[in-house]
Amino acid sequence: MNLLLNRSVLVAALALFIAPPVHSDIRLPKIFSDNMVLQRETSVNIWGWAEAGEQLTITIEQSSVSATADDQGNWSAQITAPAAGGPYELVVAGAEAQVVFKNVLVGEVWIGAGQSNMAYGTRHYTEFDPDLKKAVSGGPHPMLRVYVDDAWR
């Protein structure tokens, strides 16, 4: 009886060490984060990386789409943005892991572009513009978001 118990424990221990680890790592670019803004009234492209062949489900409000990571782990999907407003949660779920983005708004997305003055960054302009400083810090328009230094604010 004791020998049978010892054998069972040994087999269970070996199974733990021999079995391949279950690892699921879902990653997205830094542009996707808490507090982000998605363009309203359109399909939004969501992309990232996961284990090759992993099935993913991307959900926001009532919209849900599926994607499969290719041999290099790249995946992409287009999801219909919900009505303007929020806050919403955007969830990217795989078999073993999920990424949840909170406080996501849907509305107008504006992109500023220019020459060297654009490289200075919005954060630095707040030192000279008190209205911009208020807007970026959450008031008087708490639904206004600015993407600064790899994060939505």
Image (cartoon, rainbow, N blue to C red):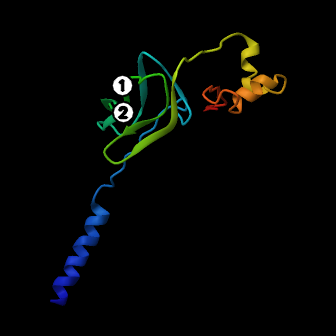
Residue 32: image tag:
none
Residue at image location 76% in from the left, 21% down from the top:
120
Measured along the vertical axis of the image, is residue 120 above or below residue 74? above
Q: Nearer the viewer, mark 2 or mark 1?
A: 2
Q: Which residue is most to the bottom?
A: 2
Indicate the quadrant where residue 66 lies: top left
Q: Label 1: state its secondary structure.
A: strand
Residue receiving disc 1:
77
Residue at image location 52% in from the left, 28% down from the top:
105
Q: Which residue is most to the top?
A: 114
Q: Which of the two labelled residues, at mark 2 and mark 1, occupies the earlier sequence position? A: 2
Asked if disc 2 and disc 1 are in contact, CB closer than 8 Å, the reply is: yes
Q: Label 2: state its secondary structure.
A: strand
Nearest the eye: 66 or 19: 66
- Which quarter of the image is occupied by the N terminus? bottom left
Q: Is residue 85 left or right of residue 95?
A: right
**Mark 1 belongs to which amino acid?**
Ala
Residue receiving disc 2:
58
**Mark 2 belongs to which amino acid?**
Ile
